[in-house]
Amino acid sequence: MRAFRTVFGLLFTVLAALLAPAPLLAQNLPYHIDPSARDVQADLSAVPAIRFLTTADYPPFNYRDATGELVGFNIDLARGLCAALEVACTVQAWPWDQAARALEDNQGDVLIAGLGITPETAESFAFSSIYLMFPGRFVMAGTPVSAFDPASFAGRRVGVREGSAHAQFLTRYLPAIAQVPFETEIAALDALKAGAVDAVFADGLRASFWLNANLECCHFAGEAYFRPDLFGPGMAMAVPEGRDAVRVALDAGLIRMKRSGALDELYLRWFPVSFY
């Protein structure tokens, strides 16, 4: 997880300028939270305030902008949850290597910083509902087409980051594709733009930032592939074991934000080219 955070932080630094508004056409939205679900029975009398802990090194989710202000998707989500639940809220940044311990030591109530959901972390923390996942996506050049069948790519050249989970996906599910390895996903996407490969299969989030600056060239093709065993289970908030009232309140807040449209608005604000 630390390596991923470092690599993605460097990538986002390079691509930060690409967050300028892009043309919003038909956009697919995350649907991990069911807006038609009955309100979770949260005892908000037991949660008069929520102390969120985060980090400042994980853009675009939680980081400091040029003025030093703590910003990001997770920061806006934390504040949106407090508004939906009508409870007071604070957000405090900690170094990544201290954040989980600070939560264990009761320095906060919730960690919203991209902590991985693993058997090890599950021993110390309970997790909210997953609110965002990172699918694999095909990217192609040219004009978008209504139908895309990756099986028809047998023998064609598809760029992929060497040694990545996305390369494993192609090996496992589409072995007839001719993989072309690249050191980074951006290098693969640049090769697509130059016509050196027929498509790229990559992390949808990272590809979306690249696409935001290359809409005249390329587009997502086909469906989003969610494979938790390869691409990870997604993002959720961590709370200490035994803090069920806080965890249930977070889930209730997510349902309210999805129902009101606030969660979708937040997603499109930070990710104008949807990777879903």
Image (spheres, grey):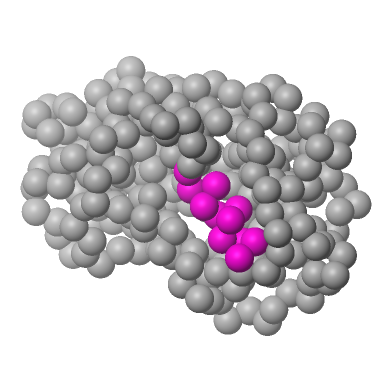
* Residue nearest the observer in this picture, 158 or 260: 260
**Above or below, comparing residue 254 to residue 195 in the picture:** below
**Above or below, comparing residue 217 to residue 34 in the picture:** above
* Residue nearest the observer in this picture, 202 or 174: 202
Is 98 magenta? The answer is no
Q: Is residue 104 left or right of residue 163?
A: right
- Range shown magenta: 72-83
What secondary structure prevails in the magenta region? helix
Q: Quadrant of residue 174?
A: top left
**Is residue 185 at all visible to an observer of this figure?**
yes
Question: Residue at 59% of width from left, 47% of height from top?
Answer: 235
Label count reads 0
Residue 9 percent location from the top left of the image: 44, 27
Residue 19 percent location from the top left of the image: 29, 43
Q: Is residue 220 left or right of residue 38?
A: left
**Above or below, comparing residue 236 to residue 160 in the picture:** below
